[in-house]
Every structure is written in C-alpha cells, then in structure tokens.
Image (cartoon, rainbow, N blue to C red):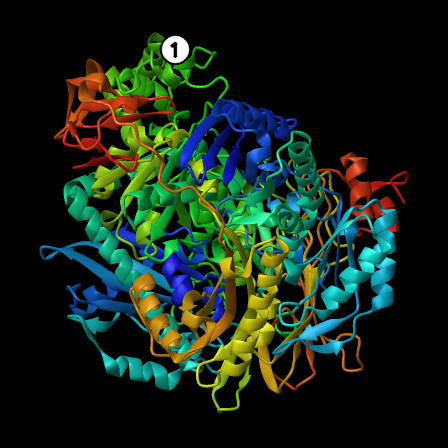
Amino acid sequence: MIVAGVDIGGTFTDLMLYDTDGQDVHVHKVRSTPSEPDRAMIDGLLELCAAAGVAPGQVGAVYHGTTVATNAVLTFRGATAGMITNRGFRDVVHIGRHQRPEHYSIMLDIPWQARPFVERRHRKVVGGRLVPPRGEELEPLDEAGVRQAAQELREAGVDAVAVCFLFSYLNPEHERRAAAIVAEEMPDAFVTASAEVFPQFREFERFTTAAMNAFIGPVTGRYLERLAASLHDAGIPGELHVMMSNGGVASAAQAARRPVTLMLSGPAAGVLGGLWAGQLDGRQRLITFDVGGTSADIGIVTERGVLEAQARDTQVAGYPLLVPMVDIHTIGAGGGSIAYRDHGGAFRVGPRSAGASPGPACYGSGGTEPTVTDANVVLGRIDPDRFLGGEMPLHRDRAVAAVQGLADQLGLGLLETADGVITIANANMAGAIRSRTIQKGHDPREFSLVAFGGAGPLHAADVADILGTREVLVPPFPGITAATGLLTSDLKYDQMRTVFMVQGAIDDARLDRELAETAAELTRRLLDDGVTAEDITISGALDCRYIGQGYELRVPLPGNRFSEAALEEFHQLHRQEYGHAFTDPIEVVNLRVTATGIRPKVERLPVHPGSMQEALIGEADGVFRVDGALVTLPTRHYDRAALPVGEPIAGPAIVFQRDTTVVIPPGWHGAAQSSGNLVLSR
Amino acid sequence: MGHKLARMSYSPIIRESEDFGCVICDAEARQLCESRESTPLQSGPIPGYIRGINRRFAEIGEEWRPGDVVMHNHSYYGASHGPDVAFVIPVFLDGRLIAFSTTTAHHLDLGALTPGSCGIVDASDAYAEGLQFNAIKIEEDGKRNEWVWRILRDNVRAAPLVVGDMEAQIAAARIGAERFLDLVERYGLETVQAASEDLMDYSERMLRAEIEKLPDGTYRAEGFVDGFLDHPDPRYKDLKICAAVTVSGSDLHVDLTGTADQIDLPLNMPFEGTVDIAVYLTLRSILLDSATHDHVPANSGLFRPITIHAPEGCLANPRYPAPVIARFCPGNVLADTVMRALAPIAPDRVSAGVGNLKVVAYSGLNEAGGFWVYMDIQEGSYGGRRGKDGLDAVDTLYANTRNNPIEDIETHFPLRVTRYELRDDSSGAGTWRGGIGTVREMEMLADGGFSLEGDGAKHAPPGLFGGEDGTPGAVILNAGTERERVLPSKFPYRKASAGERLLLIAPSGGGYGPPGDRDPEAVAGDVADGYITPEAASRAYGPGTPA
C-alpha cells in the first residue's frame, strides 16, 4: 500500500510518500498556503507522486498533521458559540479556578475572561441537577427550558452549542437529552456535550474543553470536509486521517467531532517521528528535541512508550484542556531567538524571535538584531553558502555586525558574545529538558537525544553535554520528521470514566463491566473507520491516588481487568514519580481505555552509503569552547548524503544536509548507521 | 518542589487551592528562588521563618545540624500565622551550612478551640489559636522525633490529612535540598554563590530602576477593615489602615503610622510574615508587573530598596501575645491601601479598590467518629484599570489560591454547592468598570458547623480618578427562607444542621475614571451579558445608553 504523510505547518508543508511493500520512500517540502492550506497539500502530493512515478490513484491513505484547530484557538477565530448549563452556575467558565495566571501582576488579562469561547449572553441556564456518588437525579432536566434556550440561541445567530452539566461524567443522560433537543431546534449547529468530549471531573476544565470544542468545531469541520473533497477532486482516493494530540490518528469524521483533540497534531507527529528514529537503532529511552525557528518542542519516550501529559497540566493558549495529549514541552528557543541585553544588564536569549520575517540578520531581509542563527554563522557552525542546500545564501557580514552590536553593549569580544548566545540558548533548552525529565523521576543521562528540526542537530551535542546525555541521534530526514511520524501512527481513540472507588471497597465487577463497555464503544468507532477486528488492540488503565490526594497516576491494567496487582503497582509509580510512597488506602478515580487500530506504516528506509572521500567536502575554521577556553579549530565539513556506514568522524566536524546542519563538537564523534540515523556519541 | 507537593498532598487546601510555598534560601536566609506553583503569601514569608528559627536557636543555645528537619509556625518568630507551618531542611556541604530548603503550607487544623484553621475569630490571644511550634526539630540526625508527631496527632482534628500533608511537605523539601546539592556539585559552591549574588543584585537593580522613574515625594491613602460589625465596642470595627509611601531616588519607604491600635481579637498582622509581605508583593506587582515587564527572579535582592515602618502596638505591628490568626483580610486591605497610595504616580499600573476575600471552615463528624474539615475560599474582584475593566472573581493581591471544583467538594464532603456565579448589578461604574464578585451558596447535607473570616461587607472597594465605588459583599444564612438571617463578615464557629445554607456574596471592585467616559459599546455589551440592567446602566452611564 502507498501511504502519504502531510504535515502542514505555518511556513512549510512537509510531505512523505512510502510504499509499504517496496519500502521505497520519497520526500518533499513546499511552502504552505495559509489562506487555503489544502492547496499546498494537493499540489505537493501531486508533485510527489510524479517524482515517485506513482499514480495519484494508487495512494491508499493520507495521514495529516494540521494546525487549523490550534490556530483557531490561538488567533481566537471561531464560531459564535453558545452554552446550556445548570441554573445557578452560569459563570463556571468565567470564574475558572479563581486563580490569576500571574502572581505578580495587576494589568494582566485572564484568557477565559478577556476572550471567552462563549460570551455570557450566550450562556443559558436550565433546571436539572445530578449529584454524586453515581449521578443520581436530584432535579429532573427542564426539557422545555432547554428547548427555549436553543430557540433563543438560534435567534441570536449562534452556530455551535456546548451542553455542560455538573456531574455529567457520572451520568451523561441530562447532557445527551439536552444535546438531542438542541440538535432538533438547531439542525445546522455543531452540538457537543462535555462528557462526550471527555467525561472527567473538575467542571471548569471540562466545560472549558467543551466550549473550546464548540468554538472550533465548525471551522475545523469545514476545513476537513474541503480537504476530503480536494483530495477526491485530485484523484487521490486514500482515506484522510488526522493526527491527534494523543499520538494516534483519527478518521476525518471522528476528528471533526472532537477538534479539541487536534491541538498538538503536528508536534505529536514530531515526537512519533523521533520515536521511530530511536527504534530503528533499538533505543527505548528517548528525548525528542525538535528545534525550529522560534521554538523547541521536547518530548519524552520511555519503555512505556511516549509520555503523556497529566490532564491537570494540559492547556492551550492559557486555557485548560482535558484531553489526552503527548507530553510536549515547548519553549521559546530556536534559530530565530533574539539575543539582547535587558535593562537590568542581563544577557538574554529569546523568547522573542525574529521569526521567518525579517528573520535572522544573516538572511539579509532587514533583520538587525542578533539571533541564535547569526551566532552560529559567526562561530562557523553554519556555512553561509550551504544553507538550505545552498538555495538561500546567508550574509556572514550582517551576522557579524549584529553580534558585534551586542558585544559592544556587553563589553565582550565578538566570538565570546556569539559563544555566549549559544551557551544561553543551550542552557535554556537543557533546563527545559531537565525540568521535564527530573520532575517526573527520570534521569536524562539514561536517555538518547533525538535531534531534528532545522536547528536541533546544531545544538544537540552541546545540550547533551549539559545534561550528561551520551548519545545524539539525527534521523534520516530531520527537516520532515513530523511527516515521517505521521506514517508511523495507528488509529487511536481514548475514553475514560470517573468512578471514585476506594481500596477495600472496590466493586471489581462494576469496574470490569465499565471497562468492557468503554472498550466496546471504542471498538465500534474503529470498526466504523473500517478497521478489521483483528487489527484492534485494547489497553485499559486506572488513574489512582492515595485517598485524599488531588492528583492521579496512571496504572496499566494487563488483560483489561481489575486486579489487586494494579494497586501494588501504584505504590511503585508514586515512589518513582515523587520519591516517596504512603501507606494510605488507594482511591481509583478514573478508568481509561485506549483502543488502537493498527495501520500500515513506514518501517526501515533504504540507505545508500557512500565513502569518506565523497563525503568530505571541505574544511574551515570553527570556534568551540574546550575546557572552558574559546578556541578556533580546523573543522572538517561533510555531506551527509555521501557518508559511509559505520565509519566514525571525529569532532570538531560539521555534517551538512539540505534540511539541517549537524555539529560534532570536539570530544564527540559521529557515524552514519545502516538504519539511516546519524549517531553522535562521546 | 511545588509540583511534587501539590501532587502528593491530601487536603484540598494544598492540592487544589495550592495554598503553599517552596523556597530555597542561602545560609543567610536570603531567598534565592521559589517554585512557580507557590502562592505569594506562602513563599514570601519563608526567609522570615528561617530568621525566626535562628533567633529562637540563639535564645536556647541551639544550632543547625546535618539531618535536621525543623518545624516552625510561631507568629512572633517570623511565621505568617499559625496555620502556615514551615518545614525547613538545612543543606550542608562538607560540614558547612550552605542553604535551606523550605516548604510552607496552610494546614486544615492545628488544634484551636473550634474545628478548622480559619474563622477562629474569637481567639483572645496567641495560645487560643492552636499549637505553636517554635523551631522544633521534628527530625534530628535523620531520626524522626516520634513524640512530637504523637503530640501533633493527639491535638489536631483530621489528623490523618494534616499529618499526610506535613509528610508531603517534608518530602518536597528534601527534593529541594537534593537538587540544590546537585547544582552545587555540578557548578561548584563558589560559582553558585556568585551567581546567587548576581541574581539578587539584578533583581534589586530592576526594582530600583522602576522606583527611580517615580517622582520623589510622599503619597498617602487610607483603607478600612470591617472588623467585628456585630461587636458592641466601636474599637473593634471600622479599623483604619494608613499608608504613606515616600519615594526618594531609588528608595521607597512605607510608613503605616496612623493605623488602628492592636485589638485582643485576631485581626492583628504580624509585622514580619504578613505586613512586610503584603507591602513587598503589592509593590512588585505594580512596579515589575509580570504581564508587562520582563521576568524578574523572585529573590531577596528584590526587596532591598524597600523599608517599612509600623509603630509597635498597632494592628500592623502587634505585641505578643496578641492574636493574629485571622490577619488575612486586614493584610489584603493593607495591600490595597498601599496600591491606592501609589495611584497618583503610577496611574497606568494600579487598579481601583479591590474586593476582599472570605474563607470558611466547614466541619462535622464523620461516621467513624473522626472530624471532617473543609476550607472554602471565596475570591474577591479587582477594581478597574486604565484601559481595562477590573478582573472578575479572582483572588486578590497577595493571595492567589485556586477554588475547589464543585464536583470534588460534593464527592468528598457532606456539602452541596447550590449556586456559584457572578452577582448582578454590582460593579463600580467607571470609564473602566470594577470587576464583578461572585455569589456562592453552600448547603450542609449533615449536621456540623462552620466559621467564617472575611471582610468587605461594609466598606465598598473605593473608586479611582472619578470612578464610582464598588459594592460591598454580604453573608446570609438560609436565604429566601423563614430562617433567613444576615450575618457579619466574620463569625466564630457556629453549629449548623443538615439543610442549612450559607450564602456568601463577594464585593465587586471600584470603577476607574468617570463613568461618562465609558465606551457606549462596552456599556451595551455589559447590558447584553446581563452584568447590568438597562435601568442601572442609564443611571450610572447616563441616558441614551442602550436599553
């Protein structure tokens, strides 16, 4: 089967075509077309098919990473959304957790107050109340009230409605009934219910998630419909799948129901691409390190797979979001990060970025402030004549002028300043990685760093040094790792239910029944997507905590049935995560089920090794810090495409390829692998 | 540290409300850094706790030793108030004391006369407020002093929760100590210390640069604490707070002379731990506002440019053993007063008058005969700001906790939240109107009781630059029934039976600038959103505004 991966980012659209039988791969990168994103996808796919000698009609599936849903939130362009909620609780999404996002500020804005997904005028309240422990009905739903509210919303021009009731995670009946009435009254509206999106306790977070789903529902739905139509019109029959934040893909239909699951569509694909590269060389513990122009995305992989964020920690644009997400930490550090001296005299790098326009000073497009890329040019780590395969010559003199300006302010030399910029940027990136690993009880020294993105491999070895990490992997196509990741994904749906049971009084029959029901529901979704039963796997887990605690840890349930062993496992996990375990009874808070539908995917790529003579393309001065001193060393330059397999290159050396530059500092060496990875170690 | 403390702890006041602080200090008790999750009123006082322990150690001839864990909550030895208990772990390198890792957290109960650790508003002296731990070594040489733990367990209600939270605090403090040692191992003590000095100097420079931009002179404001509105003696109500802020070059002095005399009920504020923190945090939030200013490290260097004076014997500098446990609300009035004093010289960085908070302790006996205690914090609201309306329904100034989800409260306690939303027609009119407070009503589902400490039921948050005053809050028992009764903004423990309801109404903030200058579209929006009725809108903003 021929499968295509298409990751549409803000600047570029990355494409990969893979033949799962012939293991043949073709890649392509085109400029994105933000006003009509599907154009870049279709044009790119057709060009790629032509280059690969494949008829568009042969493409069996298209896997897509998208920023459409995320951008709708970030730019706050969505539907006129309405809400129906409990009487007496009109402002749950406005009050939030009553905490200011900044401790030390008077002039701050609170996202959900300054930019509400649903304005108060469109928040309607109706009678009806459910109560714990099982969602018993204290007051019946006022169905006439719901109908009237829906009519008012329709007249107000609302085109998406979130139905949000307290304790719906225990009993979704009121929400279901209300949603059905709204759908009758507003047949063209996008209608969503909070427990349908994610049935987890904590009303502000769940209601906000549902409100966001409503806000971005229509725009995402229209986009996916148009994309499917465009693919059809271009003669590409492959079914469209969209990458979700949880690291799985959804059918376009499922994605359109739950657009809030697409927030990390592209970055999650990047982590999967990093995971795939690590697995090629049998590595299980990975830190994925994706550095672009403005930001660095960091993901963690352990023996248990890609690390997921805890629902308590997940947010987008400052709004809480209760859906499963790969744990990706993004910091404002990239090639375009601007270095400056602040008015307290501190030497800082980022998070402000020169972006793609004007870009770093060396682009010669009007930028004058020194960036990380400029510092790399000054230090000889980026060759101005080989940037983007030589297609975009850089202006070394402008880089020097920009860095010199900062050097004068700081009273330092040019090279010292350039080195300072890199050192600070690296320290920021290493600090972010440390906080993600050590905070969760992992030692970064036991991991390999998988570096990709335009700037990741430039900094990876230095960052690894700070962390004590001994190995860096650079995947075969570091500039389109996310597109690769798309082709490694499976269909993956999650569902959970809040159960609240305490050790000693666990109703294991009920747990097993609810696990089975949830598994059946997800299996149905996969079967609807055309997955055959034998390609479906189910995995269950419990979110547990010591009774009284407020945060849960996830314990896997082998066999998808409850067993006391899971509670034992919880003590272990608690000790690993927090360095401490208690003896108190354990409370089971949620049960979770993940259903995976296996898809054909990219495996090993063909490798065409060359020789050292072909690969060595020159030598130039490079500036490095060795034992604390800044020294200029002759630095060999290599062409990655021509590297032989298994022959080590000693640092200092620089390996060029079209989409990135790999720096091998003194003390490190690198060798191309038969897997296609370039591995640096020390 | 904060991440782990929130996740390991038991009681909602720590794990959901995040009423805790985590700080690393150097050997001289100077704060080097704090964890992001800390609430300002918990992290800010930590250096003072350590200085207080040092003072106590000096009195009794004791010193810090490796393997110590010290428990401390003495309000006259640097602690913020009794319920905020610190656990301090000294960090040693080759036998030399180099740092302290500390966590503070608000505990549910410390054995005061009635259940809970808030609303103990009838405590007549420090002894009535609960157990006092003055530099107690709860671990020595790595060994736990089980006797102290037993005293604790025997004397607090809801002991399993309190002790679990304390264990979590110690575990989190240990992590801080380990991480600091890692840092020292990686970079060497000398480098770490030099960097610490640099960072403190840097923070100091940042604040000085902002003070220098202000015109020299003395600027004054007054504020009022409700006090005990039902008390027969006038000395217990309408307690005045006076602030005179003097700017002189890059120095700033705050003089609280004129503030009401101390009283023998617990609204007195410890000078160190509450007053200093209220002043520091308010000034930094105005002058180095994190939304508009580059990040400034939160360390002790930051506060070097600021001095504070409060005459001994006043509400802001009480003499031992005056009770202080309910100092939270007066401290917020103090912070608001300092902010308003700065208004004439920093008009684009302050808000009009701020609405104060309320804290309730609900409690009762559970089936097993033990106590359940639940602390519920009702937020306030901010006044209008230049260019922006006030923030609605948030913790204000030196407080920044989180509310507890309704779905969590009702699952774990015999309580039902029957209403939680914004109040009607209450915000102070202005070019930029005040923020809107909430109404929050709780029903008891079993017999028990509650106590309340709050303020702002009488004195409205003041308007600024021509804006109108906001609206005071209120407390109503069994609203809408035959048993309806208005209660004062603070009352000690009172019994309540199943079915009784406590309705809390938060104050709404003051307006900023003349109401007549408000954008008509903003008024129309408020009417559409139901924040203000058409009639009230035309009263406040003039006829011709939308109806």
Looking at the image, can residue A70 be seen? yes
Q: Which residue is at 76% across, 60% downward? A: A179
The residue shown at (60%, 42%) is: A240
Q: Say which of B538 and A542 sits in front.
A: A542
Viewer-side residue, B542 vs B233: B542
Kindly give the residue lying farthest to the left in the view shown: B94
In this rendering, the answer to whether B416 lies above or below A338 is: below
Q: Nearer the viewer, residue A485 or A191?
A: A485
The residue beneath circle 1 is A393
Q: Quadrant of the C terminus of chain A?
A: top left
Give the camera-side residue of A52 and A569: A52
Give the chain of mark 1: A
Q: Residue, x 31% and y 84% (percent of image)?
A: B151
| Residue type, label 1 | Pro
Q: Position of residue A368 (x, y in %)?
A: 42, 14
Is A479 left, or right, of B50 in this rendering? Answer: right
Relative to B357, does residue A397 appear above or below in the rendering?
above
